[in-house]
Amino acid sequence: MRLRGLLILTFAGLMGGCLAAEPDDPRCTAFGGCGPWGGGAGGDEGGSVGDDGDEDEPDPDEPGGADSAGDTADHGLPCDVRDALARGCGECHGAAPAFGAPMPLTRYDELKVPAGSDPTRPVYELMAERMTAEVGMMPPDGDITDEDAAVILEWIDQGAERSEQRCGDEPPPDGSDVDVGPEHLPCEVTQQMTAHAHGSLQQPYAVPQQGADNLYQCFVFRSPFAAGEQATAWAPIIDDQRVVHHWILYRADSGNYQDGSVIPCDVGLQISTEFVAGWAPGGENVILPPDVGLELGTPNDWYLLQIHYNNSANYSDAFDSSGVAFCSTPNPRPKTAGVLTLGTTSLAIPPGAVGHEEKGTCGFLSTLSWPGPMHLIASSPHMHKLGRGFRTVLERFAAGTEVVTDIPVFDYESQGMYLHDAPITVNPGDTLRSTCVFDNPGEETVLFGEGTNDEMCFNFVLAYPIDQLSNRNCGIIF
């Protein structure tokens, strides 16, 4: 699978859950993406809470004390477990939890406290379940090596005992120090679209203290771009990372919108608008090849910035101005990138189905009409709550296959756009087959529709030269 990093939404969110609270605050109880195991009771950040609930103050003069050079025995984890947690979970569950994570997972006592979602069980037990779940797997999309997962699960299976190992060095980096953000773009930022107060583009959005543990909010902008202007690069702006789960930027050529307004997000955005850009934890800056520019529509278009917030920790001071920064050029580049939609609308998921597959084929008869090769830059699969897995495979007319997109464990709350390591070339006559896997525990057949209780099976693919296609939907009707 030639995927480098999550650009977003995933259509969705990578991490629900809640953030670490202050010592006297009630712990939160939500499950979700980056924070799936609920918040247990705990002490101050960096402190240690023993099984009896009392603080365990290490003696700096003892061999295991806090001042011992190279000694990390006070974290209580075997060194290989500590390192595996840092690599696989540390971006969200580090010492300072981020992106909706409910707690850090850096110390033994943080894994032994009662889980907020089920106080009768410790965090590590629920952690094992989520790491092996078919729905809502953690880390999202199974983004952990088999070796690291095996180390963690074996330690849990053997009783998750405290360790006094002296690890002797710092844990490995968690990947959160990648150069991401407008300041790391190799170009001048020309436009920014960020969360804002209703009617004021300059004031930040006040994330509600209550009722915002799974909040989708849309921020409306009249297009700031001139006719023919193209984006050459873009970067996420992440302001209050405690509560920002992910974001997606859509473009609409019509609608009853008001510039600067803040509105509830309509689930139909995925099919009534164009997907432009997005971000989720792990996403990076996007820099297009020097001859490729992203289409930005006309000055009469509307942009809707959808941000998924998670404020399960009930922060009263969450004021956010997250969004996206663009570099753009008024001089169109020779190759125009935009969205090609793959998948199918012909869905009928029977009641009680497990592992039911629906397929959409962008076949050779369709691609034969293309005037030349299409180059796929990124993929953004989209299904609703019954979705369990997604895959798009390229079948070459000249023989051979290539996996374009492979999400073996799909999660409605963890959808994203995935940037390919290198553009994937689709030649005229090639076939693109997309397969959506669904479970339907209900008693009624579920069909295609815009509602969350309906289903979809799409792959929104960023491709160029998109302007050479008269029809940007390939195979989705039959």
Image (cartoon, rainbow, N blue to C red):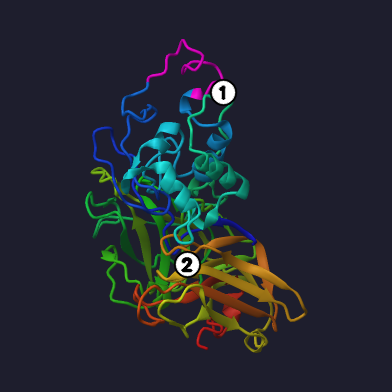
Q: Secondary structure at mark 1?
A: loop
428 lies above or below 113? below
Residue type pointed to by label 2:
Val
405 lies above or below 285? below
Residue 167: % across, % down: 58, 26
Q: Earlier in the sequence, mark 1 or mark 2?
A: 1
Q: Which residue is mark 1?
A: 166
Q: Which residue is mark 2?
A: 276
Q: Secondary structure at mark 2?
A: strand
Magenta residue check for 323: no
Left or right of 145 in this view: 209: left
Residue 190: % across, % down: 46, 56
Q: Which residues are magenta?
A: 57-73
| Closer to the camera in the image, 366 or 101 | 101
158 lies above or below 311? above
Residue type pointed to by label 1:
Arg
Magenta residue check for 69: yes
454 lies above or below 60? below
